[in-house]
Image (cartoon, helix red, strand yellow):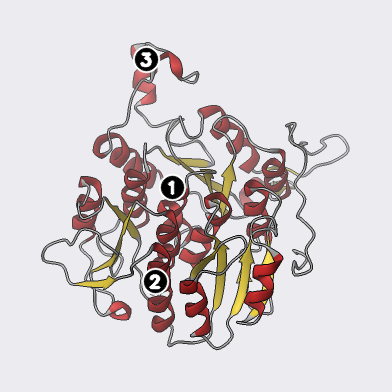
Amino acid sequence: MPRPRLLIVVLLAALVSVGCGREDSVGESDPDTPAVLTPKREAFANLGFPEFATKNTTRVASGNATQAAGAIVRGVFPDPGHKPRAVTLVDTSDWRVAVAAAALMAAPIDAPMLYSDGDDLPDVSRQTLEALDPEGSKAAGNAQVIRVGNVAKPSGRKTTDLTGATPLALTRAIAGLVISAKSRTAPNVVIASADDASFAAPAAAYAAKSGEPVLFVNRDSIPPETRAALASLARPRIYLLGPSSVISPKVSRELRRLGTIKRVGGKDAVSNAIAFARYYDGEREFGWGVSTPGHGMVFARAGRPLDAAAAAPLSGAGSYGPLFLLDGADRISTALQGQLLDTKPAYRTNPVAGVYNHGWIIGDRKAITLSVQSRLDTLLEIGPESTPDNPPDEPAGTDGPATDEPATDQPAAP
């Protein structure tokens, strides 16, 4: 798999540092940066290494999700001759709507997401929309902009408006548009937690790749909006994302009346994302199946679902990688280290003939430190095959290995 070109790194760096107010020095509170930069160090930092990129990672160093979304969409569509058909505008007020709207990125709608602040369009979103200048998506009524809920209405742009009285009504409207664009075929549907954002966040990346709708349930109940959306389909294939501690067996039993059910998940948010990344149902062609080397990957902080939704276009184009979560700014869990060691590329004699992994880092140094980025770079790096004289690395950490919670409706991951 080819490494991303430096052009994209420089573009993202410019968008974040110029358009989004990047800080060059964060003082003594940030252990990765001295309070005073020497001229040589400052000049080196301005090259973008290693803050924006290392040999195996690229960072979108935005301070918030609105900035990240603008930078990512420009990075995914840097060529005026290859632009999305439309752009989706979503309010930052509800992460569930943002996660569901990631599905609009996929074909045939082809509308990556930008954030609106109520009916006000932030400068970074406005500038990105102007730069992309979408021509219109036939699958969305020839709309140049898909407005989800009470968001800004850019002048001079043809819009398709998705409305709903509640956030979950908006997720139902999104699912309706996605399904209608696919000729109303019975789809695979991802059901995620409406209560725990970190368990639901990985659904955004997969939705952007597959175009399959995401709907939400509470731990012990199915909201009427979700029930109505599922009932309108001809027994869809339902994939339940999360363990039974997050989405109860009671809900699973009720969902089984509306479609066929398979559950995939892990005991915590980090291992849940790993389980979803590794899972693949060949019969239904559902899932990432990332258990071998040679993949793109996206890394974001747990508890920041708007970042996960903003990053979704990286999973729907280019390297098509799943989302992995970090449970702290300055640490990588044993479970995630184990996953990356499992998928670490190796070569026998010639690394040029090997495959490569690449990681996108979402957030500034307050979200994910430079030391963690450096460790991720090492874990993604191609290296010589292990031998008795060169044993493989072992995960470092103290939080123990990840194990999926046993459940009667949980299939074995490949």
Q: Which mark is residue 307?
A: 1
Relative height, residue 376 to residue 39 (above, below): below
Task: Spot the residue most to the right.
Answer: 388
Q: Which of 105 and 3 lies nearest the eye of the viewer? A: 105
Task: Specify the quadrant of the image occupied by residue 176.
Answer: bottom left
Category of crowding for the residue at label 3, using alpha-carbon neighbours closer than 10 angstroms: few (below 14), some (14–19), many (at least 20): few
Relative height, residue 315 to residue 221 (above, below): above
Identify the residue position indicated by label 3 in the image.
40
> Residue flagged by tag 3: what amino acid is it?
Lys
Q: Are marks 3 and 2 in contact (CB under 8 Å)?
A: no
The x and y percentages for residue 295 are 59, 55
Identify the residue position indicated by label 2 in the image.
174
**SS assignment at label 1:** helix
Q: Which of 152 and 374 lies nearest the eye of the viewer? A: 152
Tell me if 276 is positioned left or right of 103 in this view.
right
Task: Specify the quadrant of the image occupied by residue 260.
Answer: bottom right
